[in-house]
Amino acid sequence: MRILWLHQYFSTPKGWGAVRTYEFARRFVAKEHSVDVLCCGGYDEWLQEEVKKRGFVEVEGIKVFVSKTKYGSRMSFIQRVCSFLKFMSYALWFVLRNGRKYDLCIASSGPLTMAIPALAGRWFYGLPYIFEVIDVWPDSAIDVGVLKNRFLQWISLFVERKAYRYAEAIVTCSTGMTDRIINKLQGAMDVTPEHRSEIDDFAVSSVSVGKKTYRIQTISNSCDLDQFKADSVVRSEVRSQHGVAADKLVVLYSGAMGVSNQIDDVMGAINATKGSADIVWWLAGDGVRADDLKLLEADGRVKFFGQLSKVEVARLYQAADVNLVTFMHTPLFYENSPNKFFDGITAGLPTIFNRSTWLNPWLKAFGCGIVCAGGSPGAKIVNELTSLSKDPRRLKEMSMGSRRLAESVFSRDLVFEKYEELLDEKRA
């Protein structure tokens, strides 16, 4: 099957973005599909340099076409919108010129603008597409308060409805996202998903609305078992490099440092542990709140690394003890499928969340995570970290549970089987 994958934020492990598309695409290639990817290279500068040589980059058998569109986590709302529209235009032109030669298109959102070229391929050439919901746009942008204009909200919601309407299948990254989309399609007044208390088997959901039957498949973010595997040698090297003793509890926060990441909870926890010499903080990432976190380096227990490649971040995970994941406390962020969580459990790190999450059933079943929901989550995070720093046996048990969860449920190869089954259905 000839696949065209539209994903503005595509990144390889040499970049600092999520590698979901890269990992799935190279597995499709290994199964003898051909995969062409359109991206902007904003999260992987290596791609931008390589594409100058022959117009595209070939990596692991994937042919990657990189536009000149710029994108960065510190862009203003207007700059981001301009970036989205510019890349959408590039992708639309590519589809209009080349859409006939593909058998399937996968359009990954956010941004939601990726639906436009996918719809164009569907309407002009009958090119079927899978609409992959990585971020619940426009709900997330509206919820955070960055999409305030009523007209832009209406346009976004209109495009979202069309994207679902004409898709061969809808792929989501979490059970919460799946529930939200089902509620929307059924016209529910409140689309906030119910919090699940049981483990989901990720079966395909079929939703009939009028004459249309929608197929929705949860294909979560997942774990690269070899890259993030615990390594005692790496652990010693990295800790020694940064002057951290073997008996210190290292808490790692990695990834985006933006408005939606509730950085105040991170800062509150760091400040509240000033009297705890046994707790060390490592911060790796970028975003509009990054400078606030960098100021905390004045405290000798805090190390700010800035934006690192996936390979470099993996070494930090291998040397840390606890993974911290934070998001805004509004209901929508219950659905997030954070890559940092999956990287963490792969390295055998227990995870502390500052809020409720769709992953809670797995955290309980494998004893590998703590949810600090409700009021004063920052204070609760501190209490949990203090407890873990004094209880190495519990920390070890949670670590073992984390790795078991990565291997038995969220291994990239296991999760890929769901995607392969979906494509086999389309091919049949």
Image (tube, rainbow, N blue to C red):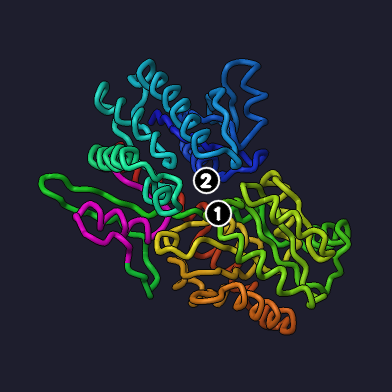
Please check the rendered image and state whether residue 373 is part of the magenta-colored stretch, yes or no.
no
Residue reaching furthest left?
Answer: 211
Distance (Cα) linking label 2 and label 1:
9 Å
Q: Determine the residue positioned at 76% across, 62% down.
A: 319
Specify the quadrant that holds the C terminus: top left
- Residue 294: name its quadrant: bottom right
Where residue 149 appears, as percent x and y from the top left, is 36, 41
Q: Determine the residue positioned at 59% across, 57% down.
A: 340
According to the image, label 2 marks what residue?
A: 20
- Kindly indicate whether the residue at mark 1 contacts the one at mark 2 (C-beta within 8 angstroms): yes
Classify residue 95 as left or right of residue 368.
Answer: left
Amino acid on which disc 1 is placed: Asn
At mark 1, the secondary structure is helix
The residue carrying pointer 2 sits among few (fewer than 14), some (14 to 19) or many (20 or more) residues within 10 Å by Cα, namely some
Q: Which residues are magenta?
A: 167-193
The residue carrying pointer 1 sits among few (fewer than 14), some (14 to 19) or many (20 or more) residues within 10 Å by Cα, namely some
- Residue 13: name its quadrant: top right
At mark 2, the secondary structure is helix
According to the image, label 1 marks what residue?
A: 339
Task: Tell me if residue 130 can be seen.
Answer: no
Indicate whether 121 appears above or below 77.
Answer: above
Indicate whether 195 appears above or below 133.
Answer: below
Where residue 62 appears, as percent x and y from the top left, is 53, 30
